[in-house]
Amino acid sequence: MKSYRLTQAAEDDLFEIWTFIAADNVPEADRLEADPLNGCQRAADRPDIWAFPARLDRQPVRFLLVRSTYLIVYDPATEPLQVIRVLHGALDAAAQLQQ
């Protein structure tokens, strides 16, 4: 099993997702937190097979969609794998990545 690391922006994304869900249901927020983290691990284990190669700030990145809900944005060339963002599917990903 390969490793990954979250950027501060990715950590902030996860916290925002958890906080939003926890406002209604803390146990559900805790349970759902595993989904994007499992996606990060899948990306770390097989970084080159996931779809949608793209460039972000002149840096090659890839995207992994988890349960049609979370978009994991990562740099496949880094080790440990750098997870750049973890975006909720309801957000405008392009606008979020521009920030």
Image (spheres, rainbow, N blue to C red):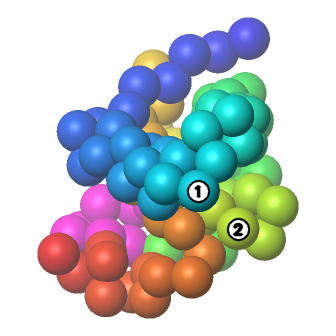
Residue under circle 2? 69
Res 29 quadrant in image: top right
Q: Nearer the viewer, mark 2 or mark 1?
A: 1
- Between 90 and 57, which is closer to the camera in this rendering? 90
**Residue 81 at what x, y percent from top left?**
48, 31
- As shown in the figure, which amino acid type bears the numbered disc 1? Asp
Instruction: Please state the horizontal and vertical placement of residue 25, each as a whole percent of the image.
Output: 64, 48
Image check: 87 left or right of 82? right
The residue drawn where x is 31% and y is 77% is: 96
Task: Decide which of 5, 20 is in the foreground and name it.
Answer: 20
Residue 67 position within the rendered picture, expressed as x and y whole percent measured from the top left? 82, 61
In the rendered structure, the answer to whether residue 67 lies left or right of residue 88 reads right
Which residue is drawn at the image coordinates 41% and 25% (left, top)?
5
For the C terminus, the quadrant is bottom left
Residue 90 is drawn in which quadrant? bottom right
Q: Residue furthest front?
A: 24
The residue that disc 1 covers is 24
In what quadrant of the picture does the N terminus appear?
top right
Tell me which amino acid carries mark 2. Answer: Thr
The residues tagged by marks 2 and 1 sit, at their Cα atoms, a distance apart of 18 Å
| Residue 1 shows up from this direction | yes
Answer above or below: position of 1 versus 31.
above
Q: Is residue 60 part of the magenta span, yes or no?
A: yes
Q: Can I make out residue 62 in this image?
A: no
In what element is the residue under mark 1?
loop
Residue located 64% across and 15% down the image: 2
Q: Which residues are magenta?
A: 55-63
For image coordinates 21% across by 70% down, the residue present is: 57
Residue at the extreme right: 67
Magenta span: helix, strand or loop, mainly? strand
